[in-house]
Image: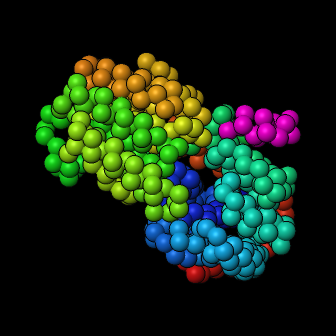
Amino acid sequence: MPPKRRILLLDTNDAMGGVVRFHLQLLRSMDRARFELYVACLGHGPLLSEFRSVPDVTCWTMEVGTKSTAWCVGWRARLADAVGMALLFGSALRLAVRCRRAGIQVIHTSDKKRSLLLTHLLHRLTGIPYLYHIHAQYVEYPANRLALSHAAMIVSNSGAMRRDFLARLGPVMERIRLVYNCIDTERFSPAADDTVRHEIGAAPDDLLIGIASRLAPDKGQESFLQAAARVAVQEPRTRFVIVGDDSVFSDNASYVSRLRQLAQVPELAGRVSFLGYRADMAVITRGLDMVVVASWHEPFGLVVIEAMACGKPVVATDAGGIPEIITPGQDGLLFPPRDDVRLAEHLLRLIRDAELRRCLGAAARRTAEERFAVQTCVQEVAALYDEIAGKSDPGAATPAASRCG
């Protein structure tokens, strides 16, 4: 049997989101007989325990200068940025030593700014090749161009993101590979679950309509509530659920207040529940009757395939990568971003047609199983690791590494 490939996944995120969920799924599902897995993540915050809980993965902690919302403006922001850069350089030096000792062959990084800076520094210090994984639209800054130009491989999570990079940077980006995000179709599966219904005090015959994402303007919760008010006037048996956390984002305080004000209009008073951040998204999703994704632009839409895997009818914007997932009228419904009138029309149609809800949900489940099952994605990423590592010197033998240092 050939020696295992030694892979480092770099994650500098502060809070749970689509990128982190993808990273965790990848770590849980990668073949341990073929790969020895390492993850570098922040040494504080809610994600550390998540990464530590993944079996047979060596966890390295680091500090890269995260800052609270109170330090995001004025002189405080400049000072925090300077301290953050010092911490990032220190983390790069420590990780470089660990990578050398462990014989890391491939670094897998997302397109987050801190991850790219750290990855490029590691590459300069160690020569280890890296995979640049696109999860969002291209943003112009020097570290991004630098990371793209030196990446051994570039992978996009949707055709929409690949087209965005091509439009911004030209034909050089044609080398981008496409690997769709994946879903654990056993964890996210159709099953009866009344947890949410009991939690919010909904009646047995109420229809629960939910939206789940961080609370931010571009995620479209305002459109969701405006549509909900239109629906509630005509269908009093509806309840609305908003899942998501705004604590990391400094510019959202007024937006969250706006959402809570919208939830108190007469049509919606007492019928909207804010659940905050939830780690039990499979349970939450199974408890809903319909799922809305109202993002102005969604690079891929992991929450879309999570809901589809649970057999739920999804009403989502025809933006970003979502049209690559949903076939309108077959396994979901689409509407233009910020169009609360069209969203309300779709929801009313589903509320009044139980058979349509059932058919769309069943077809959505089949789509999730056939196109986005975790095995497909993991096999594609594993092949990329093999391709990158096969072109480079595998390095020295690996000594035992301490876990979660």
* Dominant SS in magenta: helix
Position of the C terminus, as image quadrant, is: bottom right
Asked if residue 282 is positioned above or below residue 171 in the image, the reply reads: below
**Could one spot residue 241 in this view of the protein?**
no
Residue bounds of the magenta highlight: 161-176
The percent position of residue 394, horizontal first and vertical second, equals 80, 65
Q: Residue at x 64, y 46 (%)?
A: 136
Up the image or down, 71 lies above or below 227; here it is below
- Tell me what residue is drawn at x 38 percent, y 42 percent: 211
Looking at the picture, how far across and down is residue 403, in whole percent? 56, 78
Marks counted in the figure total 0
Instruction: Name the residue rendered at 24%, 48% in the picture.
Output: 196
Q: Is residue 1 left or right of residue 21?
A: right
The quadrant of the image that shows the N terminus is: bottom right
Question: Where is residue 116 drawn, in percent x and y?
Answer: 73, 60
Image: 115 above or below 208: below
Within the magenta stretch, is there residue 70?
A: no
Residue 53 percent across, percent down from the top left: 45, 68
Q: Is 221 placed left or right of 66 in the picture?
A: left
Q: Can residue 150 be seen?
A: yes
Q: Is residue 173 magenta?
A: yes
Based on the displayed image, in which of its 4 quarters is residue 275 positioned? bottom left
Q: In this view, does 356 lie above or below 105?
A: above
Task: Please tell me which residue lies in front, 84 or 227.
Answer: 227
Left or right, 176 with respect to 62, comes to: right
- Residue at 33% from the left image edge and 48% from the top image edge: 261
Q: Residue 241 or 48: which is nearer the viewer?
A: 241
- State the colouring used for the structure image: rainbow
